[in-house]
Amino acid sequence: MITTLRATPFRLATASKAISISTFCFPLHRRYHSYQHPPPTSPFTPAESAILSAALRHVPLHGFSTVALSLGARDVGYLDVSVNLIPRGVFDLVKYHLVTERLRLKISVDFRRLEQSDGAENLSVPAKIRVLCVERLKANLPIIHRWQEALGVMSLAENIPASVSELAKLSDEMWFLAGCDSHDMDWYTKRAALSGIYASTELFMTQDTSADFRDTWKFLDRRFSDVKSIENITSNIATWVDFTAHAFSNVLQSKNVRFRL
Amino acid sequence: MAARLLIRRAAISAARPVFASPFRAACLYSTAEKPPSSAAAAQSPPSEPDTHFGFQTVKESLKAGKVAEVFSSVASSYDVMNDAMSFGIHRLWKDYFVRSLNPGRNPGGQPMSILDVAGGTGDIAFRMLDHAEKINADRETSVICADINADMLREGEKRALEQGYMSTNRISFRVENAETLDSVPDNSIDLYTISFGIRNVTRIPMALAAAHRVLKPGGVFACLEFSKVSLAPLDTIYQQYSFSVIPLMGQLIAGDRDSYQYLVESIKNFPSQEQFAQMVKEAGFMNVGKGYEELTFGVASIWKGVKPLDSK
């Protein structure tokens, strides 16, 4: 598992080259993950982080709003006007939550440590993904009653690209932490499927009134089983298409048409 | 309304000598009101650094006088020309600039003290006060309009009277050099704005240092200024427009081609978005985001900086 390289199949080839370059021009911008590179870091400057983390503490009461931002700025000694330091305002507050919780995931769920202590070495990759999903969703608990506001901000046209990219990064992070070692088209489909599952479950969770969010976890499990059945359906369809195509080519060849599949 | 303005413009341009060149303009101006700058040029030591005045290279000590001349001659037609040149878009830029800064008291906070440098006609100042009042229900936030040019300030005072702000103590007008800001105490300002002004300052780093000095720690420096259009095809059109159409408009509407020739040349000379963001950073501010935000494909940009808490 240690040798798992989180790389898109097309970038794998350049990864070894990048390692030698990275010693000269550091930090290297990369869109894949590997143990040969430093882990992803927060895109926020220390001053921004100070204001935003203080502002997040006001979110349960004041929501994702400019009020929370200016209260946060005041808490760490800035002026009200200093919230101009946060270029995208409320959206950056949402993004700060997303980024910090994503980066926290690898600390809160460390399977290598879990395997040693709990004897959980038999956890399969899908089971690990479920653990990670639940862990990440639980990080929304303190602000879940305000999360619809955040989803509203994220769905504004100018914020959609950044929101989708953050979701993709979360999905990538989860597959990496679960030890996924795909290096074919699966790399993409896995991430796309998990993004869909996570986003829909998160939305479900904002409406969930059951005790301890039992319904949310059930919803999550149903989505995972959906994906499994979709996988079955797609592989069945692929088998059928393959069979039919070959049968067709055989028919053509039996009629002396020069045709090979 | 437009006809009245045109007539007024015609009357003013008839009353004022038509200048053949900015150089001559400066001479006429200086013999009337200032120590003769042509003589000053002859006497100035050869080591004095040069600076830009549009595409011309002039001695640093002369630039302020020349800029003053430009703005004295355009003060009364300033907004009409701005509307004509930018098709009214400058109003959108200024509105967005003020809205993004969100001036005024936040719930549970203090009223802000705002310094609008090169804001003689009060364009930004009135928007700030309106925003503070209408959005943040704050009638205490005050703006100091500072400008090096008394003619522009008179224009602003006239408007402040018309809009009823003169009777309140929320706005004040001061003749002030952006490079020194002598009458503004250290660490006293929440928000420093300069809109379409910094390109006329002779020594921009000095102006940035002065902004850093007067701002409270955590205070915000915000600058709205023309910048570079990044898309090459659009830039070609933009350059064509600014060098052939704008001076012509200046001649027709304001009766003053040279001032508007200077305007487009000074825009062309102003540093790029990244360079100016770097200058803001070097003055001791923290850049906001990547340091700038482009408006209308980069025709204008907003630069913001925040004074760090640990700076004096």
Image (cartoon, coloured by chain):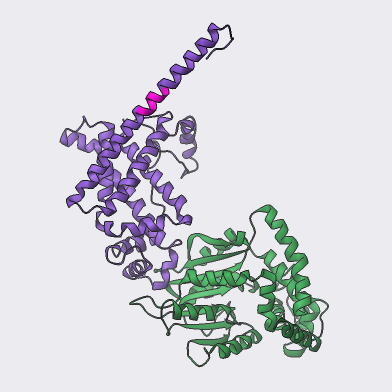
Chain colours: A purple, B green
**Residue A228 at what x, y percent from top left?**
31, 31
In this orientation, does residue B23 appear? Answer: yes
Instruction: Kindly report the secondary structure that dominates the magenta region of the rendered protein.
Output: helix
Task: Look at the picture and state if A78 lies above or below B188.
Answer: above
Q: Is residue A106 left or right of residue B219?
A: left
Which residue is drawn at the image coordinates 33% and 48% (left, top)? A102
Task: Look at the picture and state if A202 lies above or below B99.
Answer: above
Which residue is drawn at the image coordinates 69% and 57% (left, top)? B235
Which residue is drawn at the image coordinates 61% and 59% (left, top)? B297
Query: Picture quarter containing residue A68?
Result: bottom left
In this orientation, does residue A6 appear? Answer: no
Task: Look at the picture and state if B76 lies above or below B239.
Answer: below
Query: Picture quarter containing residue A256?
Result: top right
Question: Which stretch appears magenta?
Answer: A233-238
Q: Is residue A228 left or right of residue B265?
A: left
Task: Verify whether residue A260 appears in magenta.
Answer: no
Q: Is residue A223 left or right of residue B271?
A: left
**Residue A241 at what x, y percent from top left?**
45, 21
Task: Verify whether residue A236 appears in magenta.
Answer: yes
| Depth order, front residue of A225/B206 | A225
Task: Look at the picture and state if A164 lies above or below B216.
Answer: above
